[in-house]
Image (tube, rainbow, N blue to C red):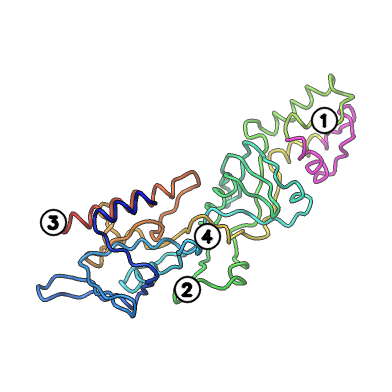
Amino acid sequence: LDILEEYLEELEVDIHTNCPINANDIEHELNERMEPVFLIENENISLNASKIVVSTGGITYPSTGSTGDGYRIASKMNHTITDIKPGLVSFNVDDFLLRSLSGLTLSDVELSFKDKKKKVSVRGDALISHFGLTGPAVIDLSNLLIEKSKFTILDDNLNQKDDDEIENLELFTNKINIDFTPDMTEEDIKEQITKDTPDKGKMSIKNYMKKFLPANFIDYFLMKINISPSKTMANITKKDKNKIAENLKRHPIEIESLETELAKVTIGGIKSKEIDSKTLQSRFVDGLYFAGEVLEVAGPTGGYNLQIAFSTGYLAGQEAANSLK
């Protein structure tokens, strides 16, 4: 931050803090030379500019100052705002026993949900938390699930809806599955159990399941499928074997709600088709540029959204400056 501030000082950039600007404070008109200019005026500031870059962020992380101002500015300039949704979120799960395993990591699992006959899935690590499920695979799946869900967290005036309305968002589906053995088929698991049983007949099913699951998760898993953890391998039935294989591949989890307060990005924003992708200038208003999370595009976890912000910010700034030459 200190280095960036030094650059701004050297380039004699004026910074106005504690100076909110809303959509009604900006006018776009022609000057005496018939050139388009922006007039920005309220009780805190009065200035004009031939170029504006709107980089106000999304709305799902208000502690950063992102309160949806950019959507209202863009809308006033005739731009379409797509459905605004919280992105990269965790899942609240109403299962006390699952939540009691808080801190446990489920490594390299596949999480999925059904879209008609198609499976939508993400592979990676999931983490059990005090409210349900989180971790890279969970929050990446949340984006795919939320993108298919028809709702917006903004009202008709593009202000955020109240907490009660947001809590009752209707998801595309609230049922997801965990595949604990993504490199094995259901038949592979059954064959493995059948092959191991003669040599491990006296071993409890609880100890044997360490082959497939984290040790701390096994009691919960066996309880959910109603198999006694003390049962020996020699005594498991064909029905037990089928239940184990089926639930290792498709262990159902029901989502109670989204942990929207911890949303890391905003899905949706200014419609991409209304912006020149080579310059990030508005197709409707000369001199108006957009950058960062105010744009419609959103990516998965792993630094992609930061990269979108940096790259679009650089491009919009460069193009706005070059267009003045």
- Element type where label 4 sits in the image: strand
Residue 218: say if magenta: yes
- Corner quadrant of residue 325: bottom left
The image shows residue 113, relative to residue 55, as above or below, that is above
Specify start and end residues of the magenta stretch as a single range: 214-240
Q: Which residue is mark 1?
A: 207
Query: Quadrant of the rendered structure where residue 93 is?
Result: bottom right
Q: CA distance from mark 1 to mark 2?
A: 54 Å
Residue under label 3: 325
Classify residue 17 as left or right of residue 32.
right
Q: Tell me the amino acid under the disc marked 3.
A: Lys
Residue highlighted by disc 4: 86
Q: Earlier in the sequence, mark 3 or mark 1?
A: 1
Q: Identify the secondary structure beneath mark 1.
A: helix
How far separated are the C-alphas under marks 3 and 2?
38 Å
Q: What is the C-alpha distance between the residues marked 2 and 4?
A: 14 Å
Q: Earlier in the sequence, mark 1 or mark 4?
A: 4
Question: To which residue does mark 2 refer?
Answer: 159
10 Å crowding of disc 4: few (<14), some (14-19), many (20+): many
In which quarter of the view is residue 226 placed?
Answer: top right
What amino acid does circle 4 point to? Answer: Pro
Q: Disc 2 residue type?
A: Asn
Name the one closer to the observer, 289 or 143: 289
Q: Amino acid at mark 1?
A: Asn
Residue 189 tag number? none
- Mark toward the start of the polypeptide (4 vs 3): 4
